[in-house]
Amino acid sequence: MTSPIQSLEVSYLVHSTEDADKIRSAVERTLGVEAAPVTEELDGHYGNKIVHVVHRLTGEAASSALADVARRLPSSTRDELLQNIEAMMDEHSALYVRLDRQSLVRGELALGVSEPVRVRVKPRLFLMKGGAVKFFTELLEGTA
């Protein structure tokens, strides 16, 4: 069977004063991401080093990671996500979720804005029946 998710991308920034390994292991452990990251070094406004880290999953690995995230979401966080799901999608029906990085390091999942871990979920459009909102709602509720 074809996976309903084409790809899942997890990205975040690591500043020179932060422990990159701690953040990476938290992302891998808490989000179920098993893909080796691709990193890019950037220069901050004051010349400080910033590393942009991206983990990419495709097919079954992406679907499995999304299912793990959906199962681990506290009900209040899931409700908040589902209430705002349409605002979190782009014109190509990709879902963008920002998770609080500090909570993630503690092994918890919470939505966040400041210094987030960004999760981008791209669906297989030909498997989407009833529109993107219904598709992601069913996936996140575990009814798909």
Image (spheres, rainbow, N blue to C red):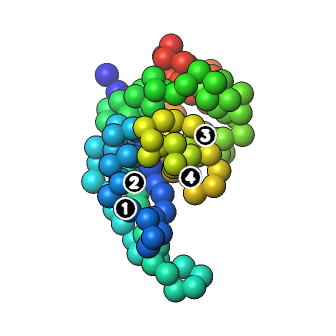
The residue mark sitting in front, 1 or 4, is: 1
Q: Which sits earlier in the primary sequence, circle 1 or circle 3?
A: 1
Q: Marks 2 and 4, Cα distance to the nearest angstrom?
A: 11 Å
As drawn, 24 above or below 45: above
Work out whether residue 16 can be spotted.
yes
Q: Which residue is mark 2?
A: 23
From what the image shows, is residue 37 above or below residue 32?
below
Disc 1/disc 3 C-alpha distance (Å) = 21 Å
Q: Nearer the viewer, mark 2 or mark 4?
A: 2
Under mark 2, the amino acid is Ile
Whether tag 2 and tag 3 are in contact, CB under 8 A, the answer is no
Numbered disc 4: secondary structure: strand
Give the residue pinned by disc 3: 111
Q: CA distance from mark 2 to mark 3?
A: 16 Å
Q: Which residue is mark 4?
A: 116
Sequence order check: which comes first, mark 2 or mark 4?
A: 2
According to the image, label 1 marks what residue?
A: 20
Q: CA distance from mark 4 to mark 3?
A: 8 Å
Helix, strand, or loop for circle 3? loop
Quarter of the rendering containing residue 89: top right
Tell me which label, 4 or 3, sits earlier in the chain: 3
**What is the three-letter code of the residue carrying label 1?**
Ala
CA gap between label 1 and label 4 equals 14 Å
| x and y percentages locating residue 3 in the rendered image | 37, 29
